[in-house]
Image (cartoon, helix red, strand yellow):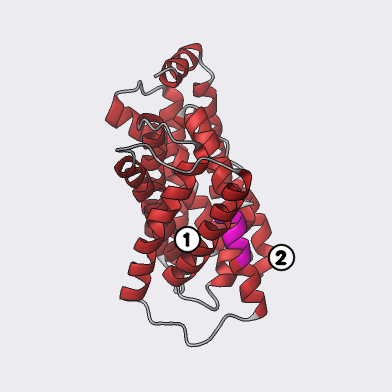
Amino acid sequence: MWGVNWPVMKLGLREMTPLMFRAVTMSGGFVLLFIWYRLRGARLMLAQGELWRVAMLAAPNIVGWHALSIFGVEALASGRAAIVGFTMPIWTVLLSVVLFGERMQPRIWFATACAALAVVLLLWHELAHLSGNPAGVAWMLAAALSWATGTLLLKRVSLGASTEAMTLWMIGLAVPVIWLLALSIEPLPAAWPSPSGWVVIGYGALINYGIAQILWFSIARRLPPAASALSIMMIPLVGLASAMPLTGERPFVADYLAAILILVALSAVLLVGRRPRACHSSHDNRSR
């Protein structure tokens, strides 16, 4: 779902400005989620004092990731943007080492080197072409760092709310922020979207901000940060492959090499996560 969403976003940006596209699809996703949860009878209220914690989670997980990444998608080929964006698991582990003192295993050094090489490779390719846009890589790296920070916070911020309530409130708090940014720095649309544009908006609202968000936050809250991040390691490959039939983008050799390097890096982190000590630590984290 999220893999195909990368070229779908590229199609949406042919008719709408980046933040306006995010604002419209996010608003639609919020409404659909609210209706769905109400029909299921889900408990959507937050306990007293939890609103600020949800806002703290929404800032990097929703506002930061979605606002920054859409500019990366605008500047880069969608498959390439997905590759850079999904260096997120590497940053998740590195941030846990820097901020929380987790041990830096040799495989983590190897994974970091592979991820860095992939980013340098894509940056070099962007700089080597007259039509290249290295700023797009910077946008995606910033988005990945924001998402990595949010992934760590999901494990360390205590919430009694259900996954449904947390997801709905996070998106609900992010919607006015994205609208404010869109209306402040972008021009208003000159025309309504075409029929195909509405299909793209529907996909973004229902899939990207609906089903996929619920699944992701369920995984992220129940698994260790490295494991939850690695559960999405195939998304950039799906994005790279689906971009060809959907948008007509043709990946370069650099894209394939970078994708391989990212997969190698993620696999190395996954092996570290299977060490007995890591498993014991993960159990301790879940018990808190």
Residue 154 occupies which quadrant of the picture?
top left
The kind of residue tagged 2 is: Pro
Asked if residue 185 lies left or right of residue 112, the reply is left
Residue 186 is one of the magenta-drawn residues: no
Task: Kindly identify the residue that appears in the image at 63 percent across and 62 percent down.
Answer: 203
Tell me the element at label 1: helix
Residue closer to the observer: 137 or 252: 137
Count of marks, rendered view: 2
Q: Locate the C terminus by quadrant.
A: top left
Q: Position of residue 191 (x, y in %)?
A: 52, 87
Label 1: few (<14), some (14–19) or many (≥20) C-alpha neighbours in 10 Å: some
The one of 155 and 36 positioned closer to us in this rendering = 36
Residue 250 screen position, x and y as percent:
64, 65
Vertical relation: 145 (above or below) 208: above
Q: Amino acid at mark 1?
A: His
Precedes in sequence: disc 2 or disc 1: 1
Is residue 12 depicted above or below 115 in this figure?
below
Is 156 on the left-hand or right-hand side of 244?
A: left
Q: Is most of the magenta stretch helix, strand or loop? A: helix
- SS at circle 2: helix
Residue 202 at x, y = what percent?
62, 65
**Residue drawn at the location 57% of the way across and 49% of the way down:** 38
Residue 226 shows in this picture: yes
Q: What residue do we see at 40% from left, 40% from top?
A: 46
Q: Which residues are magenta?
A: 202-209
Residue assigned mark 1 = 125
The residue under label 2 is: 245
Q: x, y (%) of residue 192?
A: 55, 83
Indicate whether 204 appears above or below 260.
below
